[in-house]
Image: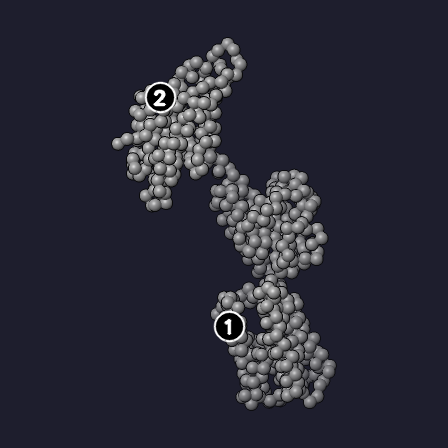
Amino acid sequence: MSQKRDHILIYFFCWLLIVPSGLYLAWANFSPQSFDWLRLILYTVMALLTSSFIVKFNGKPISLTMWVTMAVFLEYGLFVEMFISQLALFATLTVQKSSLPFIKRYFINSSMVMITSAVAAFGFYFIGGDIGTSHFGIALVSLAVYRLFYTVANLSILKIYFKYSRSSSVFTLRDIAFEYGSVVLLLPISLTLYFLLEVIGESAFALIGIPYLATVTIIRQYSKSERVNSDLKRAGEIGNELAGISNVQQVRDQFIQKVSVLFQSDHVYLFKSHGQWLEQVRVLEDDRFIDNGFESFQIGQGIAGSVLSKTEPVIYRRRSEWEDIALHFAPLDLESILCVPISHQDEVEFILLLGSRRRKAFKEYQLKILDLLGSYFIVSLDKARYMQEALAKSEKCALTKLYNYKYLEDKLSGDMDKLDRGDLRSLSLVMVDIDHFKQVNDTYGHQSGNDILASFAQLLEQVKPEGATVGRYGGEEFLVLLPNKQKDEAYLFAEALRQQIKATPFAISPDLIEDKRQVDVFITSSIGVSAAPDDADEAMTLLRNADRALYIGAKQAGRDRVAQYVR
């Protein structure tokens, strides 16, 4: 049996001990002598309506049903209050969105409401409160104590729950202040309803209830408007953050992470459109990037494929709406889905799919927010691509496509700094020079010489060890940086490279001879090797030592050989 199932069973047995027995004891000891059924029905209806109109404070949903249940308690006592509170709780949990299973939330909250009702009633009776009193002062004081005991019990139970579940409390000082402040907020409304019922009868429900519900509706609409404005502001901030990133992969990952946080998504999938099929390029689950092994699917296939086909966004509020068309990779706990196309120059470039474990997690207005974010994403992606291409051109040799002299110097200095910090154990430098290259140019032409340089660069890229950096130092000279390679290891690599160069035919089409047929040219190379920290403790010293080994130890000794720097 899983740990999650064990926890639910524990909550169930606790609920079984607390709620049914609590209702029975309340009925046996605190049931009213008489009922006004019409009034009880109206109390229940008002409690259910109030519990369905949830407002948010500090980003958390709050139900203010107690303005009804306090009046119920004052008129009919503990049992009726407990019964109506349980009904109202069920309504609240039905409309309130959460990633937790409904049954778990019900068992926990139902038990809490039962305990807090009992504790609040104890406080009421402890100071001499009287059910059905017509004395305003007694009703005011006793109901205020009732509400304070309720608040203290509620916060204490929550603290115990968070400690038991080993989760951090989500309640701030503002939340606690609101809990106590609600005594001042709800007490006058409850007392007004209670005493007004005695004066004008059931019409009091309309006189108090309609303005209350209308006010809550206005507050909810205002909160929704504030949420839209807040999301728009955050979208603008995300756009500015993306615009400041010059790496394509970082732009993509930052976009996915920010969208996940803004829309409170548990799953995010980004697909690259290739016209008639989609390639999955990134997956974020519970704030972690993962590789789930799914690669591609065709247009019209699954939710994302359908969005690609129709080029229109979709929102699914519960699993039953989409599970028949989803692909096999859909997580079992996924409920709500929002899927949108991200277009560039009237062509769909990406499909973004957001998933949530909560039902009805996404709203229609969020489509426009996501459309705006998609535009920021595409613009930032284009900018990052341009900057990376420009940087690559500034760092690369146009002929050989290898790193150029400036990049090599910076890389060498950076690796020497790593060596000084202890991030590298050693650093070896291999300098390679093509023997008699001027003779190649004079015999076959400069274009043929360029062809050999380009092919030579490809050879170096193919044979370089993992983690090595290859670049064109200048003319026919090339460098290979070998981090974490000792001098003897670098020498063995250089010797193997020399032999491979000597054995490799380089195909050219000569410009300076009458026969234009392609010919194979064989060349040799001279190579110098130096290493740090054995031979040098500075980048330029390491470079000069490799150069000395190349010219003195290899070229002057007859070429086509490898030489190590010797002090």
Q: Residue 213 sits in which quadrant? A: bottom right
In front: label 1 or label 2: 2
The residue carrying mark 1 is 159
Of residues 364 and 272, the one nearer the viewer is 272
- Above or below 557: residue 273: below
Q: Give the residue furthest to the top.
A: 514
- What is the C-alpha distance between the residues marked 1 and 2? 80 Å
The residue carrying mark 2 is 559
What residue do we see at 31% from left, 28% from top?
549
Sequence-first disc among 1 and 2:
1
- Give the structural element (helix, strand or loop) at label 1: helix
- Above or below 27: residue 110: above
Where residue 75 appears, as percent x and y from the top left, is: 65, 85
Where residue 27 appears, as percent x and y from the top left, is: 66, 85
- Above or below 148: residue 494: above
What residue do we see at 49% from left, 35% from top?
389
Q: Give the residue furthest to the left.
A: 567
What residue do we see at 52% from left, 13% from top?
516
Q: Give the residue furthest to the right.
A: 38
Of residues 116 and 144, the one nearer the viewer is 116
- Left or right of residue 473: residue 48: right
Mark 1: which amino acid?
Answer: Lys
Mark 2: which amino acid?
Answer: Arg
Where residue 71 appears, as percent x and y from the top left, is: 63, 81
Of residues 133 and 32, the one nearer the viewer is 32
Question: From this viewpoint, is residue 104 visible?
Answer: yes
Q: Which mark is residue 336?
A: none
